Image: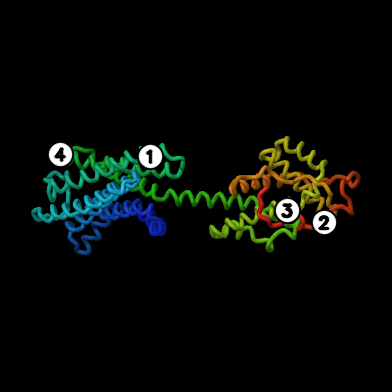
Amino acid sequence: MWACIVLRAPHAVVSRSQRPLWLIVLAAAMANSLDLGQTGRLIDRWGWEGHGVDLVRNVCGVISAVILLEFAGSVTGSRALGRWLRAAAGSVVVAVVALDLASPPHDTHSVGDGGPPTPSTAYWLLVVVTHLAANWVCALVCLRHLGGTDSRRLRAALFLFSSGAVFASLFWLGALSELATGPSWPLSLKPYFLALHGLLTSAALTVPTAAAVRQAVTEARRGWRIWPLWRELMQACPNVPLSQPRSRLLEVFSPKRKRQLLLYRQVVEIHDAMLVLHDYATADVRATAQRWSETGSHGTDSTAAEVAYVLKGAREAKLTGEPPRRHGLPVTGPGGADLAEETAFLARVAEAYAAVPVPVSPSPAAGRTGGPHGTPDTDDTHGIHEGRLA
C-alpha cells in the first residue's frame, strides 16, 4: 500500500479527481501499519502507550471510511452531499475521541478477546457502523457505475475498488459479530479480509500507472521492431532523416515524451522514404509481391507482406543504380487513424520485410516507363517531412 501511495503521490498532488482515492489508501495504510505486530513491538520498545496508538489507528480508519463515503458522493456528482459528509466526518472523529477519553482507564483497544470491549461498546459500535456504511455505499455506487462507462481502465478501477470494499465489509462484519456474540466469528479469516482490502484498493489506485506502463512497453516493443526497417530505408534515402541514425537502444528506452517524439519521427520518415521509393517500384515486383504475400511464409498479414516486398524491391533498385520511373507504383499501406495503429502496421511490415527473400530482382531495363531522362533521382521532390501518415 505504501509503495502505491508513493508511486501515485505526484499525480494526487496535481489531480483533484484522483486525490480522494489516494487519501483513502493513505489513511487505510496508516491504520493497517499501526495494526502490524512489528509496529506494536516497535511501539513497546520506544515506550509509547498502546492506548494512544490504538486510538490513532481507529481515527485513521474512520477518516478513511468517511473519505470513502465522500468519494462515493463525488461519483454521484452531489456537492451538497459532500459538505454533509465532511461535517459528519468531523462529528464522528470527535465522537470517537470523546468516547475513548470518557471510558475508564485502559491500555489497548480490543473486541472479542473473551472480555468486555475496550474502551467501550459504544466506541466500537460507532467505529464498526461507520466502516460498514462507508464500504457498503462505496461498493454499491461503484458496481452501479461499472456498466455505465466504456473505459476499460475505469471499469477495472471500479471493480477493484468495490471488491476491496466488500472484503473490508466482511472484516467489519466479523468485528460486529464478535461485539454482539463474543469470539464466534472465524478469527483466522479476518486478517485475510483486511489484507485483500488493502491489496485491491492499492491495485485500484495504480490502474493508471499500470496502463501507462503497458503503453510504454507496447511503444518500446513497436519502436524496437520498426527500427531495422527505418534504418534500411534511411540508408536508401539518406536525404530523408532529419538527423543522423540513432542508436536502437536510445530510440526505444528514452523517456516517455522523447520516445514518443522519436517514434513519430520514425513513422514520418518511413512514409517519406516510401514517397521516394515509389518511383523505383515496378509492376513485376508488385506482381511477385502479391504472389509471395499469399504464401503465408512471412508470418503476418498479406497487406503488410506485400508492402514489405515492394519496399525491399524498390530499395534494391535504387541502391543498384536503377533510374527513377516517371510513373511509379505507390508504396504505401492502408494507413492508420492514429500513431498507435500506424506503428502497429509498420511493425508488421518490418516483420515481413525481414522475411523477404533476397535479392529481389528489379524489372529489366526494357519496358521502363521512365528512363535515364525521366523523373530526376532526388529525395526531396515528394513533400519530405510534411508529417503526413499514409
Decide: few, some or many residues near mark 4? Use Cα within 10 Å; few <14, some 14-19, many ≥20.
some
Residue to which mark 4 is pinned: 180
**Of the residues shown, which amino acid type is indicated by label 2?**
Asp
User: In 3D space, how far apart are the residues under numbered discs 4 and 1 (Cα atoms)?
Assistant: 34 Å
Q: Residue furthest right?
A: 366
Whichever of callouts 4 and 2 sits on the residue coming sooner in the sequence is 4
Q: Residues within 10 Å of mark 1 (few under 14, many from 20)?
A: some
Is 62 left, or right, of 313 in this rendering? left
Residue at 76% in and 40% down: 289
Amino acid identity at mark 4: Ala
Residue in the image at 73% along x and 53% along y = 273
The residue beneath circle 2 is 377
Which of disc 1 and disc 4 is earlier in sequence?
Answer: 1
For mark 3, what is the residue? Answer: 273
Estimate the x, y position of residue 155 in percent, counting from the top left. Answer: 42, 41
Measure the C-alpha gap from mark 4 to mark 2.
Answer: 90 Å
- Residue 278 coordinates in the image, percent (x, y): 77, 48
Q: Earlier in the sequence, mark 2 or mark 3?
A: 3
In contact (CB < 8 Å): disc 3 and disc 4 = no
Disc 2 and disc 1 in contact, CB within 8 angstroms: no
Q: Secondary structure at mark 4?
A: helix
Left or right: 94, with 104 as reference point: right
Q: Which mark is residue 145?
A: 1
On the image, the x and y values in percent for residue 382 come to: 75, 54
Vertical arrangement, residue 6 with respect to residue 79, above or below: below
N-terminal label among 3 and 1 = 1
At label 3, which amino acid type do we have?
Ala
Q: What amino acid type should be assigned to the residue bearing mark 1? A: His
Residue 6, located in which quarter of the rendered image? bottom left
Task: Look at the picture and state if 13 lies above or below 175.
Answer: below
Q: Looking at the image, is mark 2 or mark 1 earlier in the sequence?
A: 1
